[in-house]
Image (cartoon, rainbow, N blue to C red):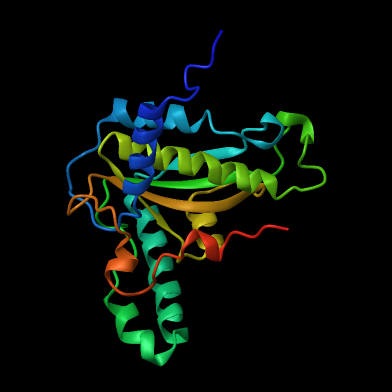
């Protein structure tokens, strides 16, 4: 069977556009997300590469308001600490940034890595156990791209206390918290330029600044 993607410029062009338009979304419309579409995107995420085919990702969808409020409280504490620790010259800009969609996105989801999974029989993870977490990140990125291809947006909230999220989700001790995801229809529409770049927080580095040849 021949490779269906061998030298396919049309597919590459569509993929390149998808990557450019994948953005970290912080503001969402209240419209509900179609459940079949969400399931379809999660199915693609479940095809992501994983060390030893261990598939350590564990997606926990949080609908319970009390649990979500505990996560929001964690964000508020962590964000206040981050603001206080920010250089004084950047503090005003930081305070103006919208950094989460915890109150807006119709779908809220925690993602964990099962650090004691028996799937994969520890292949590759015996010497580098952190590759389980890397595998989970691959699944998250696959989900990010799949959602964007369906006109949806994803926001990754990292200003959180892992132990607080772990407790709010009643996660098993062996599960390591990796990410909190906010999913929904972006508001305003998605933009090719990262929001932090548009707001003047940071610039995108040229490739040559991060590429080294030995």
Of 133 and 64, nearer the camera is 133
Q: Is the N terminus in the top left, top right, bottom left or bottom right quadrant?
A: top right
Residue positioned 18% across, 53% down in the render: 187
Number of numbered discs? 0
Check the image and name the residue furthest to the bottom: 88
Taking the image as shown, residue 178 lies to the left or right of residue 131, namely left
Q: Position of residue 53 (x, y in %)?
A: 67, 29
Residue 36's x, y, as percent? 30, 25
Q: Residue at x 77, y 48 (%)?
A: 128
Q: Residue furthest top?
A: 1
The residue that appears at 36% across and 85% down in the rendered structure is: 91
Snapshot quadrant of residue 199: bottom left
Q: Quadrant of the C terminus?
A: bottom right
Q: Nearer the viewer, residue 16 or 199?
A: 16
Q: Is residue 31 left or right of residue 58?
A: left
In the rendered structure, the answer to whether residue 1 lies left or right of residue 185 reads right
- Where residue 13 sits in the image (x, y, percent)? 36, 35
Task: Please name whichever residue, 65 or 100, is drawn nearer the observer in this view of the structure.
Answer: 100
User: Residue placed at 49% from the left, 49% from the top?
Assistant: 169
**x, y percentage for residue 118?**
73, 32
Q: Nearer the viewer, residue 121 or 188?
A: 188
Residue farthest toward the right in the current orientation of the protein: 127
């Amino acid at each position: 069977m021949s490779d269906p993607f061998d030298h396919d410029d049309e597919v590459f062009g569509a993929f390149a556009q998808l990557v450019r338009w994948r953005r970290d979304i912080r503001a969402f419309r209240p419209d509900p997300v179609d459940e079949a579409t969400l399931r379809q995107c999660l199915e693609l995420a479940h095809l992501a590469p994983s060390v030893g085919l261990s598939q350590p990702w564990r997606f926990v969808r949080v609908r319970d308001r009390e649990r979500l409020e505990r996560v929001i409280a964690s964000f508020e504490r962590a964000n206040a600490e981050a603001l206080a620790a920010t250089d004084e010259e950047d503090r005003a800009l930081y305070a103006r940034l919208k950094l989460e969609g915890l109150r807006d996105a119709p779908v809220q989801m925690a993602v964990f890595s099962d650090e004691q999974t028996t799937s994969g029989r520890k292949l590759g993870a015996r010497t580098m156990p952190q590759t389980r977490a890397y595998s989970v990140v691959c699944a998250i990125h696959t989900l990010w791209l799949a959602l964007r291809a369906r006109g949806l947006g994803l926001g990754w909230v990292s200003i959180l206390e892992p132990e607080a999220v772990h407790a709010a989700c009643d996660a098993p001790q062996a599960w390591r918290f990796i990410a909190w995801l906010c999913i929904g229809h972006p508001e305003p529409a998605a933009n090719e330029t990262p929001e932090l770049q548009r707001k003047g927080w940071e610039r995108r580095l040229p490739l040559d600044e991060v590429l080294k040849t030995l």
